[in-house]
Image (cartoon, helix red, strand yellow):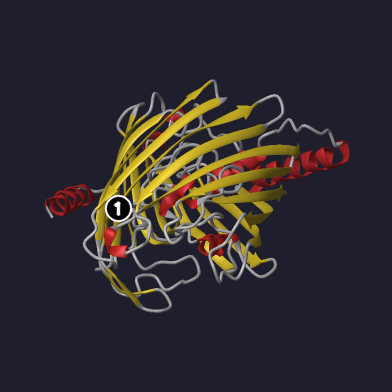
């Protein structure tokens, strides 16, 4: 296929010219000069560890005023700020629970509801040039993902014939090392590198709404599933701002990496996932609020992927994404992805997909409303009864206190790939508490 050669040649050129890795620069913080604990700094997008630390630290304006809880949270935050000043260490703890229920199931399905909890400990130790633009940090995150009941949201969709996940990340993988990497800024914060274990999805094709802990839950709403996405894996990355508006980043990761294994490059260095992205924002600080980007990706053939040592064909593709935010309250977003499919063994879920939607932030009470519509074209080679599936999702996050939020969620699954009988309604509720 000619498009295959086109993608591969351009990815090779981009990677060989120095973008060796999982590269990225964050929303350089609306800050000038030195960094602050709450400066929105970090290499990755809103769901990445460093950004999550900053978001959790921000003062909320909850709908309920619970002085005992809020004062306690303030005391903890003040103590954590002092720890950072003394040592350069930032850290967070949170616990999230997600419950989901299906309106119907396919014949013989085992479950029509599911729930799961995730406890996380995450942090950043800024031990080189603390508080400066050219800082160096060790970033870490450990999850305990556990089942509550008989099924988890990450597998619930299969009971309705749905190929994607209605509850991204909420599984029963146990205790896993999610992030363990070193991040270094250069050139007054305009150039950056990350080396170690990280999730490429936290850095590429990222728009400001993609946060599975505080916003959408469905995999299709959060990610572009025409990409052969690897899991958390070992890699290296670099990124660079050419000026205040234009950036480029790229990445090389272990194609066989998963969040629950720690054998980097077990199949050697000829099974890799490569990415390059070119993007525009009105300013560095608005990268995840006002952005247009084009991303190219290529996944090598995998000879023995996962616990079952499955063969997966190679693939490549392109994604175009954009979002725009008004006054930090309204955001609209859209993503469009295309990929090559040569066999039923390709790793991506869709040959083509599109996602559009919006979010609305209510500043007076720190609540968040979001809606998205996703459509994915399933490869003919998969042989599913339906050749596409469509997902509508809506949520409303209610900030109960400084450190507690509850999020009702509804999803409408139209023509699930393996279900020729019914469309499905998924209702859900997520609770999150932070320290």
Q: Nearer the viewer, residue 267 or 114?
A: 114
In the image, taking residue 261 as reference, residue 190 lies left or right, namely left
Q: Nearer the viewer, residue 92 or 352?
A: 352
For the point 50% across and 26% down, the residue is: 32
In the image, taking residue 363 as reference, residue 28 lies left or right, namely left
Residue 8 horizontal/vertical position (percent): 18, 53
Check disc 1 and report its element: helix, strand or loop: loop
In the image, taking residue 394 as reference, residue 61 lies left or right, namely right
Quadrant in the rendering for residue 116:
bottom right
Q: How many marks?
A: 1
Residue 278 horizontal/vertical position (percent): 29, 38
Work out which residue is located at the far right of the displayed protein and give it. Answer: 68
Quadrant in the rendering for residue 417:
bottom left
For the point 21% across and 47% down, the residue is: 14
Q: Residues within 10 Å of mark 1 (few under 14, many from 20)?
A: many
Residue 7 horizontal/vertical position (percent): 19, 50
Work out which residue is located at the far top of the displayed protein and give it. Answer: 327
Residue 24 visible to an observer of this rendering: yes
Image height check: is 150 above or below 139? Answer: below
Judging by the rendered image, the residue that carries numbered circle 1 is: 351
Q: Nearer the viewer, residue 185 or 248?
A: 248
Image height check: is 316 above or below 292? Answer: below
Residue 296 visible to an observer of this rendering: no
Work out which residue is located at the far bottom of the displayed protein and give it. Answer: 308
Work out which residue is located at the far left of the displayed protein and give it. Answer: 2
Residue 156 horizontal/vertical position (percent): 57, 62
């Amino acid at each position: 296929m000619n498009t295959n050669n086109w993608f591969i040649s351009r990815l090779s050129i981009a990677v060989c010219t120095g973008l060796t890795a999982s590269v990225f620069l964050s929303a350089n913080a609306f800050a000038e000069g030195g960094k602050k604990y709450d400066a929105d700094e970090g290499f990755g997008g809103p769901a990445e560890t460093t950004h999550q630390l900053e978001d959790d630290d921000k003062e909320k304006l909850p709908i309920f005023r619970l002085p005992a809880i809020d004062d306690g949270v303030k005391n903890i935050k003040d103590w954590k700020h002092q720890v950072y000043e003394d040592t350069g260490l930032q850290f967070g703890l949170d616990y999230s629970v997600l419950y989901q229920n299906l309106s119907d199931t396919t014949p013989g399905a085992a479950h029509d509801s599911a729930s799961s909890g995730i406890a996380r400990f995450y942090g950043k130790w800024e031990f080189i040039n603390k508080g400066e633009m050219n800082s160096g940090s060790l970033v870490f995150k450990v999850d305990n993902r556990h089942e509550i009941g008989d099924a988890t949201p990450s597998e619930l969709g299969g009971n309705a014939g749905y190929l994607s996940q209605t509850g991204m990340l909420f599984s029963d993988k146990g205790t896993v090392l999610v992030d363990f990497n070193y991040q270094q800024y250069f050139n007054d914060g305009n150039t950056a590198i990350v080396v170690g274990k990280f999730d490429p999805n936290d850095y590429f094709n990222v728009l400001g709404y993609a946060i599975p802990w505080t916003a959408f839950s469905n995999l299709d709403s959060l990610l572009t599933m025409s990409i052969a996405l690897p899991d958390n894996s070992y890699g290296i990355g670099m990124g660079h701002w050419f000026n205040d508006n234009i950036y480029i980043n790229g990445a090389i990761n272990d194609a066989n990496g998963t969040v629950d294994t720690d054998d980097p490059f077990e199949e050697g260095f000829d099974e890799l996932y490569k990415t390059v992205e070119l993007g525009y924002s009105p300013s560095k600080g608005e990268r995840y609020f006002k952005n247009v980007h084009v991303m190219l990706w290529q996944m090598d053939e995998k000879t023995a992927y996962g616990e079952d040592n499955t063969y997966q064909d190679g693939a490549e593709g392109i994604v175009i994404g954009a979002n725009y935010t008004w006054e930090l309250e309204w955001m609209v977003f859209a993503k469009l992805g295309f990929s090559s499919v040569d066999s039923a063994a390709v790793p991506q879920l869709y040959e083509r997909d599109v996602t559009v939607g919006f979010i609305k932030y209510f500043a007076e009470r720190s609540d968040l409303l979001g809606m998205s519509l996703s459509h994915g074209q399933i490869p003919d080679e998969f042989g599913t009864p339906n050749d596409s599936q469509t997902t509508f999702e809506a949520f409303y996050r209610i900030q109960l206190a400084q450190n507690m939020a509850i999020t009702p969620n509804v999803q409408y699954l139209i023509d699930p790939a393996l279900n020729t009988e019914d469309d499905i309604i998924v209702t859900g509720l997520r609770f999150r508490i932070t320290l």
